Amino acid sequence: MEQRTVGCSGLRVSRIGLATHTWGSQTDSDDAAGQLVAFAEAGGTLVETSPAYSGGIAQRILADLFGDVIGRDEFVLSGSAGVVAQIDAPLAELESGVPTPETTRPTIDASRRTLLRQLDRTLLELGTDHLDIWTVAAWDPRTPLDEIAATLDYAVRSGRVRYAGVSGFGAWQLASLAAIAPVVVAQTAYSLLAREAEDDFVPAARHHGVGVIATAPLSGGILTGKYRNGVPADSRGADEATAAEIRLRLDDRATRVVDALVTAADGLGTSPLAVALAWIRDRVGIASMFVGARDIGQLTGVMAAETLELPRAIAAALDDVSARAE
């Protein structure tokens, strides 16, 4: 797999990154092991995890695989901090058991105390002395920007973090922090159905020498074409927790884009998924993308995008059909 330089740094990562958000929920440890080995054998290097995935199970699965299945040093490991699970249920409801997803809610906290506490816990769980990429998971309006900048600088200087980054920031928020902190990586949602990053975010990142990693490049699976003829029973659109979000995106524009992807895929002898990922891969300013897979079969489909070269005419047609209304 081709490796790319991230922004103006010396960091190099694979053009496709393996996300682990399905591990522990939709993907068991055996399937996770198969994914990690297949990804490495294909030349993939960038792997992303978070203590927030599956209540921390995903991170523990990854930790178990390091050493037993494959070496940690084989990968550029990306982690994050800044999201804390808050208990919503009254104390009386929790006395008989542990908090569940229904009784907790994520709260943003990018204070120095929380960021460093979560970083130390992540390193301990993963059995490593450093993360290659460490991102602040979301913008926190309650924490002074200078405090966040100083925390990132300290984490890098201490050696526990090689490169610092952000996720879920707006363009002005990224620019403000990158001007005073060693920000090298910026993660943002970017796909054929979510092109808002092109307006200000990607230009801001390029101006500050920050490399962009696209998240949700398949827009929740919509761009695979799986929803063309209804909602599959095993899809996110059938899950009560995510169904509303998916159905909201299934509008006329999405239909036009998916139809164009299917037509392009038929002509190229590949899948709509591969075409959608190749389009993102070739966008200006994109260093890599994080893509998750439930099983090895899905991962094989994702990896097919690596060798797919989109003809200019097809890329231009996808640009046109996915353009947002003025």
Image: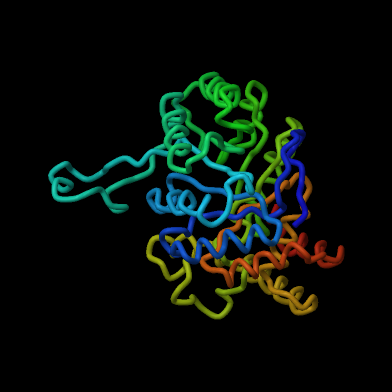
What residue is at 72 percent from the left and 38 percent from the top?
Answer: 11
Q: Is residue 180 above or below residue 37?
A: above
What residue is at 32 percent from the left and 52 percent from the top?
Answer: 101
> In the image, is 315 to the left or to the right of 45?
right
- Observer-nearest residue: 7 or 316? 7
Q: Looking at the rendering, which quadrant does residue 208 occupy?
A: top right
Q: Residue furthest right?
A: 312
Q: Is residue 4 above or below residue 185?
A: below
Q: Is residue 295 above or below residue 291?
A: below
What residue is at 27 percent from the left and 42 percent from the top?
Answer: 87
Q: x and y percent of residue 88 in the render? A: 26, 43
Colouring method of the image: rainbow
Quarter of the image with the N terminus is bottom right
Count of numbered circles in the view: 0
> In the image, is 272 to the left or to the right of 28?
right
Q: x and y percent of residue 196 in the render? A: 65, 48
> In the image, is 304 to the left or to the right of 151?
right
Q: x and y percent of residue 199 in the render? A: 71, 43
